[in-house]
Amino acid sequence: MEPERKSAVGLVAQTGIGSFVAWYESPGSQPWVAADVFSTAPRELIRTISLLETLQLIRVVVEVVEARVVQENPSLREAVLLYSREIAFSAADVYARAAEARGLWDARLESLVVDSILSDETEAELSSRVAALGWRAKGEVSVLIGTAPEPLDQESFRRVARKLGADILLAVHGTRLVLVLGQLTNAENSTMDAESRSMKVAEALVDRFAPGPIVVGVPVKTVSLARRSAKTALAAFSVVESWPKAPRPVFADDLLAERALAGDQLAKTRLVERIYVPLIQNSLELLETLTCYLDTGRSLEATARELFVHPNTVRYRLKRITDLIGWDATGARESFVLQVAIILGSMSEHENRKRR
């Protein structure tokens, strides 16, 4: 032990023995002084000596007092036992208060970090604050937004996340509960893609949210980029109720059409890039077929008549479209998304032509 720590421990021990003598000589003349024993210790002593070490030191001091004082005067045994018990409780109280203060500080810092992510603060500031909270996640990060339960049991969220190999930060914003999910190294999930890992954790946490929609933002590589995931989650959460049959939880990008209609420029760009651009670059024939199919109410026969082809040709082209962009035009939900994407794409192309 360093000399400074030895000196501080010795000072506490001397204060404790002196307080015991003063109390024993006149127990009714002054208030109980056990709680004041640790007030003489430097503040940093609490940070450098653990509660276990403190209790061991108390035990050593009590054993020395019993060996040198109680043996000579057995009548002091009961007083020593009573006083040592109170000293132990007092030490526990000191550390409990320090832990409580630390917990409150961590909670405020955690809320501040989540606020920083939602308000789009700089990456450097965010990384330093997350490090102070002991963030361990090294994998992809996604932001999850749902309705906050009453009461909120934060530890239940953390336990579930840890079991599934994730670290989380959480904060309540009004009625919304915002979670930042970070993936830890987990061999079991190594074969899953980022979206699947995020969805697995989100599905496990569903029952801990209050009733209402839950949205999972687009995964990003690091926590310093979490604001990008937060933007998609916030935009999706604001429009999720416009899709009554939305799954719970739902990915933010599953609401691209609703977000685009609400004015989300990022959603507009993603729809055009994912659907319109591959079609127009690959085959104008496929784009024409899809547009006609959607305009005729998803009728194979009507589309075939419009294009002067056989219905089987329309089926073949629709299959090629699905293979190319991953969206099935024959489904009601996906056809709606495709319709919005085509409109946005044609508008974008018209604007580009005007600029030329």
Image (spheres, rainbow, N blue to C red):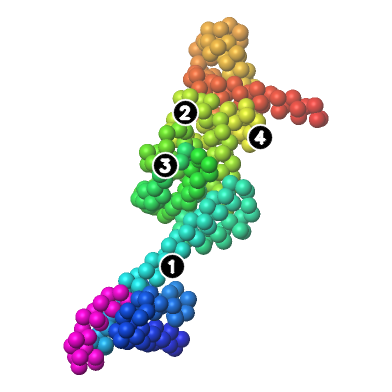
Find out whether the residues at labels 2 and 4 contact each other: C-beta distance under 8 Å. no
The percent coordinates of residue 87 (x first, y second) are: 32, 76
Task: Tell which circle, 1 or 3, labels the residue nearer the N-terminal end.
Answer: 1
Is residue 49 rendered magenta in the image?
no
Relative depth, front residue between 315 and 246: 246
Relative depth, front residue between 123 and 15: 15
Q: Is residue 236 above or below residue 330?
A: below
The label number, if any, that marks residue 265 in the structure image: 4
Quarter that holds the N terminus: bottom left
Graded by Cα atoms within 10 Å as few (under 14), some (14 to 19) or many (20 or more), the crowding at tag 1 reads some
CA gap between label 1 and label 4 equals: 48 Å
Give the residue type at disc 2: Ala
Instruction: Provide the residue designation for mark 2.
Output: 246
CA gap between label 4 and label 3 equals: 35 Å
Graded by Cα atoms within 10 Å as few (under 14), some (14 to 19) or many (20 or more), the crowding at tag 3 reads few
234 horizontally vs 97: left or right: right
Instruction: Provide the residue designation for mark 3.
Output: 150
Magenta stretch, residue numbers: 67-87
CA gap between label 2 and label 4 equals: 22 Å
